[in-house]
Image (cartoon, coloured by chain):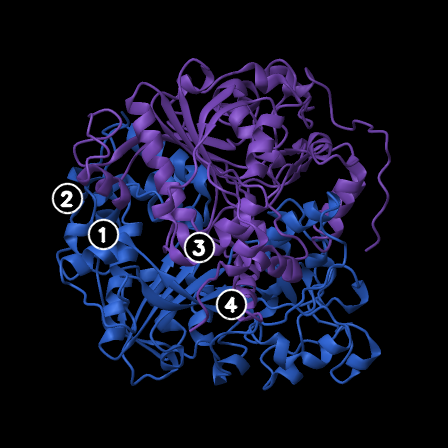
Chain colours: A blue, B purple
């Protein structure tokens, strides 16, 4: 399949706002001042004339939906009954929602389609929520321990008698406005579209043939937000916000693998969020599905083997090199899109950022959000075998309030061998 | 885009085994008796004439690889340096690898491409591992607690002095042989291909235009295996195998949300696996990336709201109904493909299956693996708010050694409201 070059001039083939009565594809004017002017994202797979996107809903789970239709267990064209599904907490609208520079990879109106696009739904358009807001109680053994050691106290509002924490939790699916995503990566839109098409082995030819379709629903994981305290306080820079932006690491987050600091840092951040909310502030964990630096777990495990087996063993001075040899890059997480969800929440200042990552810090501050203090992981929470990772990262620019390791320090920081 | 109907006769357009010297796409003969006769999976995005698949490597992370190329941080056509990446433990080959009925959704030779396809690699083919095998030490607070309560003891082999468990862990990416996947779902291959194409909004037109390409690398999450004890023992039905097949639930597995039993059941299974391995057996956790019954987290949270808000509140008798209203199905996990990884490990008997799911049990036994005892989650580990879920599932066919709840029981089993 040949990849056509993309015309640099965009000809909008979809219909114009106000034409929705015609039953065609609603126009999308990204960053428009209201939901009505912005227009709904329509990713239906049954009524093609109404589609105004490339791709389909639910990220990679669209593939399972396809299996369900093939297997005959899901009726083709099923429309979600959205009764009682509306958000438990009202988020926004915030001025950032109408700024095409601030948000390019999620749909700010995605949580409230039941409401703001009620007219389209009434006309039979298949408009689906891409964000869902609910409540939960979460129980973490590490928080129970913090209570036992009296680092935290039950207050009945944030931390409950049964040692669970009360949270608002929000699931967010990716909705990419391609012109904005390209700008974020400082490339022209045509190059972005061509790379997305070619490097996936030809996924969605519309990426290169339909420059009029500016929205892409990529088949990737999204984000989950856990809010401690009142979600409305996130948008008030006068309320102290403690936040961590965490990238998924299944091996540590779930199973407690000791080669990295992921779960210890995450649970430390949750403790900080709870304490901050109890002290009159608000806390936020933003959890992104970017396993193994967005390289995936197979690559991650290949790198583990190469690190442990190399001449001289696993050492901090060669930490990044082994990933580069296997993957071609040190990291593919691209924090460029990460701040979008913070702007969606209306955040203008993070008083305490529980992260040492310079990439995350640069992305957040570069997007116009002020950051106060940076909170590093306490030394006693770093597993012995994870010293290689954390020392290498500090030397490469991660935040520390201690000494930056020298080349000799890095060469002498060793991890366990394979046994 | 129109979906062409698929010719029922497959014309193999790729080259034949033995022709690899020609530089064309190697033929794949799924289920062939050796790696050489099966042929390598080539998902390169640079040399199209050598590709013999639809899609690209790394599941959904292929999208991030595309971003990396677009952003200029990854050189197009980077070839992985596989030095020192080979598996830490030899798995197979097992007779099941050469049985096109037993394995259809992963590549049995995917862990050993460095070795079995060395000739193709030497000729410049971009053959990538789709399975990676490594070692790890895992620390779980729940296991530390089991030690404190003396339910478990340190033995220095499975459970170490620092209360971590020594495991072999394996990441597995999906590699679908479409004729076999179709057969598993009891549909014709053309219908499967058409549904995959149409219900994803037109992902990979080759699904419907290239029936000669039988391999699909779908952009979905894969599986991770955690083995306690000697991995070679998995294939020996005389060694007692304790196993759980677990489907991802980020909200519980990582954050401990109390609306379901996922993390408590998972950590109970890990405790059972450790005990079994210490007693001379072997343990296995197979963790599948199928968040929210493969509906994704947005749908899951919408359903939570609908359950909690419905007339009469959250009750077990209406548990499945709310999911069906929103998603159109109760569940999209499709356990049909799940046993593949068990066959890859050579498993013929699971002595203790730590799962109550009838779908999982039926899929495992239906695929020819014997199951001995089924181990239910201990009552004291079921969070109060998760009673709705577990009672509804037991009534619908989940295994129990207790009483099956009646309609009246289900109606009176209530969850917490939204507060």
Of tags 2 and 3, the one toward the viewer is 3
Residue B167 visible to an observer of this rendering: no
- Circle 3 packing at 10 Å, graded few (<14), some (14-19), many (20+), is many
Q: Residue A31 appears in which quarter of the rendering?
A: bottom right
Whether residue B11 sits left or right of residue B64 in the image: it is: right
**CB atoms of marks 4 and 2 within 8 Å:** no
Residue at the spot 54% in from the left edge and 82% down from the top edge: A98
The residue pinned by badge 2 equals: A409
Spatial distance from mark 3 to mark 4, Cα to Cα?
A: 13 Å
Which of the numbered marks, if any, corresponds to residue B386?
3
Q: Which residue is mark 1?
A: A395
User: Do discs 4 and 1 share a chain?
Assistant: no
Residue A268 seen in the current view: yes
The correct choice, above or below, for A86 with respect to B380 in the image is: below
Residue at (65, 78) in percent of width and height? A29
- The residue identified by callout 4 is B308
CB atoms of marks 2 and 3 within 8 Å? no
Give me the chain letter of mark 2.
Answer: A
């Amino acid at each position: 399949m040949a990849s056509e070059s993309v015309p640099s001039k965009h000809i909008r083939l979809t219909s114009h706002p106000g034409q929705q009565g015609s039953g065609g594809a609603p126009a999308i004017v990204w960053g428009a001042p209201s939901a009505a002017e912005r227009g709904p994202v329509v990713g239906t797979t049954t009524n093609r004339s109404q589609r105004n996107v490339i791709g389909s809903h639910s990220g990679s789970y669209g593939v399972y939906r396809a299996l369900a239709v093939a297997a005959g267990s899901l009726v083709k064209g099923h429309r979600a009954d959205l009764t009682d599904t509306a958000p438990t907490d009202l988020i926004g609208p915030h001025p950032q929602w109408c700024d095409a520079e601030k948000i390019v990879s999620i749909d700010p109106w995605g949580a409230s389609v039941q409401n703001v696009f009620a007219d389209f739904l009434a006309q039979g358009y298949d408009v689906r929520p891409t964000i869902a807001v609910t409540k939960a109680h979460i129980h973490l053994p590490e928080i129970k321990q913090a209570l036992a050691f009296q680092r935290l106290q039950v207050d009945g509002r944030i931390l409950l008698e049964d040692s669970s924490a009360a949270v608002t939790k929000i699931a967010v699916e990716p909705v990419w406005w391609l012109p904005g995503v390209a700008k974020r990566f400082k490339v022209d839109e045509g190059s972005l579209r061509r790379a997305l098409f070619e490097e996936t082995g030809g996924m969605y030819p519309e990426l290169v043939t339909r420059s009029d379709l500016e929205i892409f629903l990529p088949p990737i994981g999204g984000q989950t937000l856990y809010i401690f305290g009142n979600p409305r306080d996130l948008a008030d820079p006068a309320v102290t916000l403690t936040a961590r932006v965490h990238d998924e690491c299944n091996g540590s987050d779930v199973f407690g693998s000791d080669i990295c600091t992921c779960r210890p840092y995450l649970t430390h951040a949750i403790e900080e969020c709870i304490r901050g909310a109890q002290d009159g502030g608000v806390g936020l964990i933003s959890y992104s599905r970017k396993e193994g630096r967005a390289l995936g777990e197979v690559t991650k495990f290949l790198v583990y083997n190469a690190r442990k087996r190399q001449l001289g063993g696993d050492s901090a001075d060669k930490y990044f090199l082994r990933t580069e040899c296997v993957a071609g890059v040190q990291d593919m997480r691209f924090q460029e899109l990460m701040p979008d969800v913070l702007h969606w929440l209306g955040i203008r200042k993070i008083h305490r950022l529980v992260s040492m990552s310079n990439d995350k810090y640069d992305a957040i501050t570069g997007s116009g959000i002020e950051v106060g203090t940076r909170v590093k992981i306490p030394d006693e929470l770093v597993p012995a075998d994870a010293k290689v990772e954390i020392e290498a990262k500090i030397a490469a620019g991660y935040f520390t309030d201690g000494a930056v390791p020298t080349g000799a320090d890095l060469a002498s920081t060793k991890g366990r061998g394979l046994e």
